Image: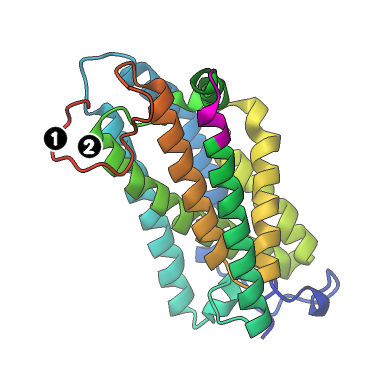
Amino acid sequence: MIPAPFILAQTTALEPPQIQASAMDLTLMFVIAIVLPALDLWLYPKFVKTVSDPQPRSARSRFYLTGISIQWIAVACVAGNWVACGRPWSSLGLGVPSTLRIGVGITITAGYLWLMLRQRRVILSRPNGHELIRRMVGNGAALIPRTTLEGRLFVGLAFTAGICEEFLYRGMLSFWFSEWGGPIAGLVVSSIAFGFAHLYLASKDLVRTSITGAILWLFAFASGSIVPVIIIHAAMDLIAGDMGSRALRPDAAPGDSVVGEESSGESSV
């Protein structure tokens, strides 16, 4: 069996699918690609309005926990169905790649992490760094943690997004559309679906987020595994939360961040 998203040379749009999608597969794809993004589009404006009120201080924490729960439920449903159908994990980019591809994956991951951390350092060192971060965050400002408890929950949300979104988009959706239309279809459709999943932040970000999804797909293809992009994705979210918390908390001193801090309460620091 060919893991379609990861062995480009042996997969063409003219080949018949090697695995037939069941009704459950189609239902899960519809929920992940259409229903959940539409739900975010409806709920996010309400969430923004709620967190703008200083009184319901637990609103952001509840939103984090809801997001974590929904994503893991989606992954559990897909994984459970995959096991029930007796399909190999390698088709989802969770197999063991060749030694060469392992080396490529390590190199890509290390290089991208270095670039992200370097960019973070450069931006934070600028006199107008916080203002630049606020412009970069845009409509996603409501998602940035403001308290130490929120910071700790945000870490869980970032790791959840890295694992679950890569499993669902670069793994499951990419696999099926590669099976049906070849790897280019897997790349394009999974990337657009990834962009649509983040449409709730701002419509103008659809293209940018879709391009990010395409880059992550190419990284997964080059490394023969979604593990490197899981690490990169989680790191991207962690760094965004760290930088955002430094720029958006009104009581923050230079260098302060709540992401990853120890706390057992909801109080600001």
Residue drawn at point x = 32 percent, y = 35 percent:
63
Q: Is residue 6 part of the magenta span, yes or no?
A: no
Q: Identify which amino acid the numbered label 1 is placed on.
A: Gly
Q: Is residue 81 left or right of residue 93?
A: left
Rendered image: mark on residue 115: none
Q: In the displayed image of the protein, which residue is found farthest to the right?
A: 14
Which of the two residues, 139 or 147, is positioned nearer the viewer here? 147
Q: Which residue is mark 2?
A: 149
Crowding around mark 1 (Cα neighbors within 10 Å: few <14, some 14 to 19, many 20+) is few
Q: Are marks 2 and 1 in contact (CB under 8 Å)?
A: yes
Location of the N terminus (image quadrant): bottom right
Location of the C terminus (image quadrant): top left
x, y percent for residue 183: 76, 65
Q: Which residues are magenta?
A: 122-127
x, y percent for residue 18: 69, 80
x, y percent for residue 4: 70, 73
